[in-house]
Amino acid sequence: MYKSTFLCCLLLGLILALSSAYNGQDIYAEPNCAIVEDHARKFRDISDPTHYWVCPEGQEKADYIQCPDNYAFMEKEQSCVVWEEWKWVEPYTK
């Protein structure tokens, strides 16, 4: 009984430790500039296509940039395009 409880607690602790150690890029939020290597890359804001993020070299926090009026950001093109050209693209999965 005690061995199974101990093993369950050990497994749970291992899972929690591994999940908290993950330092990946969250696609839904501000990029983690500490792990960004391509500082020219622009990151889309999934919740607002009229904005995107950039990580200027040497900055810890990303800049949040707004596209001009009547434009939306397309990540593949890495630029703002007129709304008529904008298309929803399924976000990347981790």
Image (spheres, helix red, strand yellow):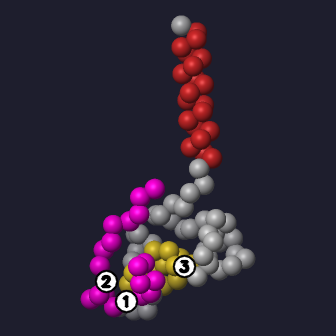
Who's the residue at 60% across and 25% down the image? 10
Q: Element type at marker 1? A: strand
Q: Which marked residue is nearer to the observer: mark 3 or mark 2?
A: 3
Separation of residues labelled 1 and 2 (CA atoms): 6 Å
Q: Is residue 68 visible?
A: yes
Separation of residues labelled 3 and 2 (CA atoms): 19 Å
In magenta, the rendered stretch is 75-94
Name the N-terminal-most of marks 3 and 2. 3
For disc 1, the marked residue is 81
Name the N-terminal-most of marks 1 and 2. 1
Q: Is residue 13 left or right of residue 91?
A: right
Where does the image place residue 68, in percent across and percent down from the top left?
Answer: 43, 92
Disc 1 to disc 2: CB gap under 8 Å:
yes
Three-letter amino acid code at the position of disc 2: Trp
Q: Is residue 21 left or right of residue 43?
A: right
Q: Element type at marker 3? A: loop
Question: Looking at this view, is 38 or 17 the one in front?
Answer: 38
Three-letter amino acid code at the position of disc 1: Val
Three-letter amino acid code at the position of disc 3: Arg
For the residue carrying disc 1, how many other residues have a C-alpha within 10 Å: few (<14), some (14-19), or many (20+)?
some
Q: Quadrant of residue 16?
A: top right
Q: Quadrant of residue 3?
A: top right
For disc 2, the marked residue is 86
For disc 3, the marked residue is 41
Separation of residues labelled 1 and 3 (CA atoms): 16 Å
Who's the residue at 41% across and 69% down the image? 46
Q: Is residue 69 left or right of residue 56?
A: left
